[in-house]
Amino acid sequence: LLEVWRELRKTILLVTHDVEEAVVLSDHIVLLTERPAQVESVVDVGFPRPRSRDGEKTVGLRGRLLSQLIGNRRHV
């Protein structure tokens, strides 16, 4: 997907349930609530590529996003 993006330089919308994949591939991440789906928050990844799956910033952002998602599920 990153190779396609590098070649085309077009906006790509990726829908995924994999938070790590979202952090590695995205510039912005939109978190949705459970049904009915609404935008919970929009997160700017804010650090350059290439991004390592086990890099400090990737792991930190992944943890914050997962905490937010888990916290939101407890309140639904």
Image (cartoon, rainbow, N blue to C red):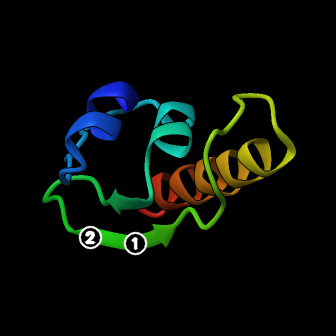
Residue at horizontal 30%, vertical 59%? 32
Task: Give the quadrant of the C terminus.
Answer: bottom left
Q: Is residue 4 left or right of residue 73?
A: left
Residue in the foreground of this view, choosing between 4 and 32? 4
Task: Give the quadrant of the N terminus.
Answer: top left
In the structure shown, which secondary structural element does the residue marked by tag 2 occupy? strand
Q: Name the residue under label 1.
A: 42
Identity, as a three-letter code, of the amino acid under mark 1: Val
**Which residue is the extreme one toward the front?**
7
In the structure shown, which secondary structural element does the residue marked by tag 1 occupy? strand
Density class for disc 2 (Cα within 10 Å; few <14, some 14-19, many ≥20) is few
Residue in the foreground of this view, choosing between 53 and 8? 8
Residue at horizontal 51%, vertical 70%? 44
Q: Residue 60 carries which label?
A: none
Q: Where is residue 16 in the image (x, y as percent from the top left)?
A: 32, 34
User: Height in image: 37 above or below 24?
Assistant: below
Identity, as a three-letter code, of the amino acid under mark 2: Val
Q: Position of residue 6 (x, y in %)?
A: 35, 38
Q: Position of residue 49 (x, y in %)?
A: 61, 46
User: Height in image: 6 above or below 38?
Assistant: above
Residue in the foreground of this view, choosing between 57 and 70? 57
Q: Mark 2 points at which residue?
A: 39
Residue in the foreground of this view, choosing between 2 and 53? 2
Q: In this view, does 35 lie to the left or right of 43?
A: left
